[in-house]
Amino acid sequence: MTDDTIRGFLKDNLSRKRFIHSCNVADMAAELALMYGEDPVRARFAGLTHDIAKELPRRKQKELASRSELNVSAVELESPPLLHAIAGAQLLREKFGIADQEILLAVRYHTVGAGGMSKLCQIIYLADLVSADRDYKDVKKMRKYAHTSLEKGMLEALRFSVCDSAEKGNTIPPCTIEAYNEFALLNKALLNKAKGKKGEDTHE
Ligand SMILES: [Fe+2]
Ligand SMILES: [Fe+2]
């Protein structure tokens, strides 16, 4: 399997707009990987392929997702827009022989997040949200957070996702709540540590 084979598949199975989005996510993923000490080649590949199943027929997405051996909740299976991430990871494994579990998990969790995400998973989650083609209201703010630290970027991205889903009356998968709690606690701990450090520094 070569990168050209994957690119060819993406070109044949994605609209031009989605293909450009995928290339932008790949660029952003490589940029964040270099910034945060992750392998830019694997990040670029995961970014390029994260939406590989997005425009396959819904029936095909369901079929792929049903064969996934990754952890999938009932809430996700009942939410059609989330299926492409699970289906994408499965497609990469069975059609293209991708065995790198971190890449597969990065594709699988790019829409919902999860507890215990690897650095690569976090990078793909953020790159999808702040790639050059994104133009939602708070994208500049989100881009700044993603470039501040992975922890801050993930917390703000998950906060945005949880609030947006709740406001729209959509369901929230348990793995998203797990991820949110994890990053909320982590950021609190980092803040307390920084405050303690500041207190120490100002002590006579
Ligand atoms: Fe996606
Ligand atoms: Fe995407």
Image (cartoon, rainbow, N blue to C red):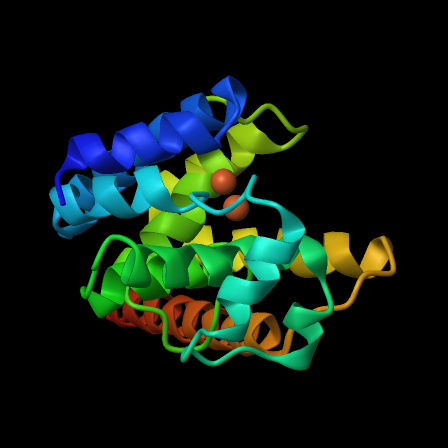
Residue 177 in percent (x, y) is at: 61, 75
Q: Is residue 102 above or below residue 139?
A: below
Residue that appears at 47% across and 69% down? 183
Residue 7 position in % (x across, y down): 28, 30
Looking at the image, residue 37 sits to the left or right of residue 5; the answer is left
Residue at image location 23% in from the left, 43% down from the top:
45
Residue nearest the observer in this picture, 118 or 197: 118
**Viewport quadrant of the N terminus:** top left
Query: Closer to the camera, 178 or 53?
Result: 53
110 above or below 14? below
Res 198 visible: yes
34 displayed left or right of 131: left
Q: Say which quadrant the C terminus sits in.
A: bottom left
The residue nearer to you, when weighing 200 against 149, is 149
Task: Classify 108 as above or below 132.
Answer: below
Can residue 201 be seen from the camera position used here? Answer: no
| Residue at the image point whose x is 70% and y is 57% from the top | 80
x, y percent for residue 164: 75, 52
Locate residue 171, reporting x and y percent.
Answer: 77, 68
